[in-house]
Amino acid sequence: MRLDVESAKKEIMRLINGEETFILNECVTCYACEEYCKKGNHPFYLITELQESKGILPAPKPIVKQWINMAIPTRKDTQYFPNSREPVISLCLFPEFMRELRGKLFEGVSFILGRHFYCQLAYLHFGKPSVIKERLPKIIENIARHGFKEVVFFHDECYSTFTSYANAYGIEVPFRPVHFFEYLYNKLKALEDKVKPLNVRIAYQRNCSTRLTPDKEQYLDRIFELIGVERTQREYDKEKALCCGGIFRGQQRYDLFVDVQRRNVEDMVKSKAEYCVFNCPYCYYTLAERVYKAGIRPIMLHQLCRLALGETLR
Amino acid sequence: MNKKEVHKALAEIVGEEYVSDSKEDLYIYSRDPGLAEPHEADFVVLPKTVEEVQKIVQLANKERIPVIPAGASLSLSGLTIPYKGGIVIDLRRMDKIIEVNRRSRYVVIEAGVTHGKLKAFLEEQYPDLCHSLPEAPPSATVVGNLMIHGQGHLAQQYGFNSSMVTGLEIVLSSGEICRIGSCALGSYWFSLEPFPIPAGLFLGWFGATGIVTKAGLRLYPKKKLRDVEVFVVEDPNLVPEVIYRVTHTEMAEDITTSAQPYPLMFRDIVMIQIYITGDEEEELEFKRKLIWSSLRDIINSKEGGFMTLAPNMKIAFLERPMSNITRFADVLKGGGFVYCGAIIPIDMFSTALKKLFEIASRNQVTFSHTGRVIGRGHCMMFSFAYPFNREDPESMEKARKAIQESYIATLEIGGIPWKPEPPIQRVLLEKMPRETAELLKRIRSLLDPNGIMNPGNWSV
Amino acid sequence: MSVDLRNVHRCFRCGWCKLPSTFIDYNCPSYVRFHFESYSPGGRLWLIRAWLKKELRWSDRLAEILFSCVGCRNCSENCKMRFKDEVTDWIIAAKSVAIEEGLAPPKVREFLENIAKFGNPWGLPRSQRATWISGVKKYEGDEYLLYLGCESSYLEAGRKVARNVIEVLEAAGISFGILGNEEECDGNEAYMLGEMGLFQELAFKNMKLFQELGVKKVLTISPHAYNAMKKYPARSFEVIHFTQLLYELVKEGKFRFSRMECKVTYHDPCFLGRYNGIYLEPRKILLSIPGLKLVEMKRTRENSFCCGGGSGNFVFDLLHGMESPARVRVREALETGAKVLAIACPICRCMLEDAIKDEGLEEEFEVKDVAEMILDSMKSR
């Protein structure tokens, strides 16, 4: 959307007043407005509430249905991990990473994962905040009954749910959410003598929900410094970052998806990045192939850290 | 029949180690992985050449012993079960890929060649050619699949696999070896037409009119790149329209459908898998855009949309053949499933789906549907599939009932049961006009006057 | 091992298990040999079920069907079901039931009895275990205990491999010793034949002896011994196959290779490859020899076609014949145009050398083990 300031002000007032505005149909749910609003007015949450109340779906109905059904716990999902102890990492809906979070950085770590621990934040992309409100209290209860004081969240959306989102909606969270960046940084610092600088140039792919909690990125910069990687100067980085485009595709905005991915990757290539570092699995799944075809190696942040410790990846 | 004498005669034909009447071998060859009742064979033989098949059939004709040709026996409809005993002829030792004519794009194979072997061979030796690969396990034989009018991944473009036959070598019930197509007139196997003997005298008869020992098969261009788009709708009534539009673009390689109650993300929706191929990324993107564009108004109405596939899902959809289909057999941890494949007009899709839900609910069974568009939407294969547990007679009975009802439902909606079990074959014969049934009877009598060729099948 | 044979009904007999992942040809040794569906993994499992449910009585044919499974694990590798890893275990468990009920064929019974009584499957005197080898010191706290194994102690083909490995180790200055006549069978074939009691007894004996001697690292000639010792419960020593150590030595530059122009194809042994995931080291050793051209057979690595010697068949050879797996494999090797068929297993050497003779291909190519290739390259200076 390209708007001048006056038009933008008009539309935001419509949102605040609960009126119809083209924003509700055009919003691609990239979360950027949450970061840009320095007043903490949560324009994105407002948009999603109105989308739902007015029956405006950002994505087709069967796609929304799939996403909602996907997270309904089944008999195979574990609700309680009796042997888990801190430090505990929540893997959300990404069990495939259990076999990757190994080595010196993850010694002695326990995991909780599965649908009973899914943060639900993705439903903001589908104009269904009610699903989050309905399910989140139970998710928090499932985590809390383990008695953890701190929980490390591998998935950025989880961290943002239990901090920014919960805070905005007055939902109590009886444990301290720790971002994966903070965990990685502290572990790396403790193993500093074993770190060998990688001396590579990396582009960092910023995921959408990170915009809810940008403060934690201080740890990211420290990690990069510690492991000896240079974050390339790019047009589409930090506040101006482009999202991976995955959700745009789900919203059937194919041309936008292609355009965003193309611009993003061209930007990475232009900056002469050797690696593209991801923190979000969904971004990785969506963008890694295009990145790879452009001659840049896609890699998850934890993998990069493990390389810096001389470990071999699968 | 004097079994000892027959055994000796068979051993003289194929060699002692390739004939058996041991209880163990008869046990296996008397049943298939479906739900059909077993019937014990008298012998199992493994010929290596068409001459050996000829001699076996001559012997069988003389002794009036039934012969049942078999590949991997994966029809799940009991089509290789010896209903009247006899000699099961396992053709899988005849597994030569005889010739590929690249320019005319055809391959000549023996009856025992598996789909997997042919696929692997072409990928290695002729990477720009492929054959139409069904979703059956790769151990299934190509000729076995032709005999049941199977459909592969090229069905949407080129029709049933049996439509791709360019020539056949058949051993008739008399033991005569017959060729039809251009191969009857020379060394080329490029075409059946305009030869006056149609392949339909043999294909679809499950060996009741002759044993196919060689086949010529069309090959098609194989592109370097392949991708899949999955369009999902909640309303099954939209499916025919979606298929109509996509087939109109002529951009898709394969179009399949699926619906199942589990996992939950698939519940209450229908997925239409649209496969595209190209030699360049641009070609792929061009096709993808045209297909998206053809469905734009359905997308804009929010009634349907394309899924974003996670990598593991995409890998599963692009696997050839898809092992997910086979894994359905373990849904009840019981080693089995059966399905009624119905060939139906596409506009009966939602009626068929509704029938499937009703049947599954009534019989309290879980189910799965997969479908494949044939031709540019001329019809489709719609499967009603039900898993069962071999250790649970109740689940087997439920699946049996469900499958019978599915066959009836197929007929009710104007479809044709594909590769029907003998009892359903009898229903079809009763249902068809008397004159048509008489014609089938006359053909069968002409080609199998002594009734030895896979009796129990297409018996009027 | 506790395996629930009650789940054997889950086999759908779909046939994925007969093939390698490339589908290029059938890959189940007994199915390739006999071609009856009964000899395929799915057919075998259905018959096991029928036998256990008393729908079929035990017979010589059933015995042959069961014990002709060489345990190559192609079926478990390629089965598409969630229970895939259990497929090989089910067959072993069925063999176990047959043995417990006294139904094992005489050849199998004899094989196991010989191991129990004489420490080797041929029933040859223990005193002959190490008499063929001289000049190799007995283990006395060396870095490695070189475990020869039955095949390398009693079979000429196996002895060749042992001699070559010993010579290479000496050339590299490695500290090692052998057990001599005190060596006990590793128990792998007992395990694969389902004789768990015997396997556990052998494991216990070996572990006790190794502990008494203070053994920290066991270097095996045979992948079968490597596989067996990996299974020993609560073992206090490391197990290494000779190709793993030789690869390390190659990397360290311990060998001075000369150029050796030859075309070689490598046969992956089941117990090194499919069972233990070791594919690279033998190849890297070969590729480090200058002038050596490594060509792959059509079925390679996890798709390797078994020589047919496993689960005791290198002794009782139920799969002999013109279409024996070894002969089929040798024909496949011939197609590569290689002059050397490289192996890393003494049983493979035995089976494949015999197959070359049976095929009349002695002039075409020969079998050599990986250690021998190193020696050849060193000696051709």
Image (tube, grey):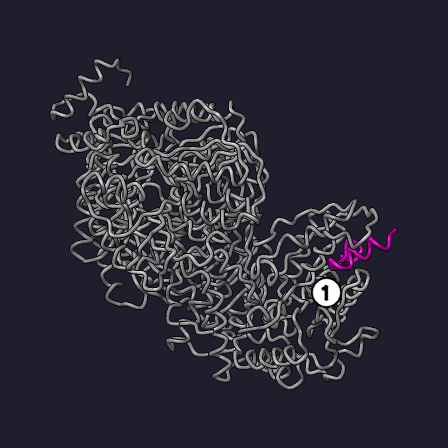
Within the image, what quadrant is residue B331 found in? Answer: bottom left
Q: Nearer the viewer, residue B21 or B451?
A: B21
Q: Nearer the viewer, residue A287 or B52?
A: A287
Q: Is residue B453 magenta?
A: no
Q: Chain of mark 1?
A: C
Local crowd size for mark 1, using a 10 Å CA cut-off: few (<14), some (14–19), many (≥20): some
Q: Secondary structure at mark 1?
A: helix
Q: Nearer the viewer, residue A30 or C63?
A: A30
* x and y, in percent, of residue B305 in the image: 27, 32
Q: Residue A264 or A3: which is nearer the viewer?
A: A3
Depicted B102 relative to depicted B368: above or below: above
Q: Residue farthest to the right?
A: C381
Q: Quadrant of residue C69?
A: bottom right
Which range of residues does the magenta coloring cover? C360-381
A45 w.r.t. C261: above or below: above
Q: Tell me the amino acid under the disc marked 1.
A: Asp
Q: How many marks?
A: 1
Viewport quadrant of the N terminus of chain B:
bottom left
Left or right side of C55 for C209: right
Look at the image and tell me whether residue B438 can be seen: no
User: Which of the 4 quarters of the picture holds residue C270?
Assistant: bottom right
Residue C202 image offset from top left, x and y in percent: 60, 80
Tag 1 residue: C354
Residue C334 visible in rendering: yes
Q: Is C377 within the magenta?
A: yes
Q: Residue at x 62, y 48 (%)?
A: C298
In the image, residue C22 lies at what x, y percent?
53, 48
Question: Is residue A84 left or right of B53 when viewed as pictured?
Answer: left
Q: What x and y, as percent, mark residue C322? A: 65, 62
Q: Residue at x 35, y 65 (%)?
A: B38
Residue C322 is left or right of residue A174, and the answer is right
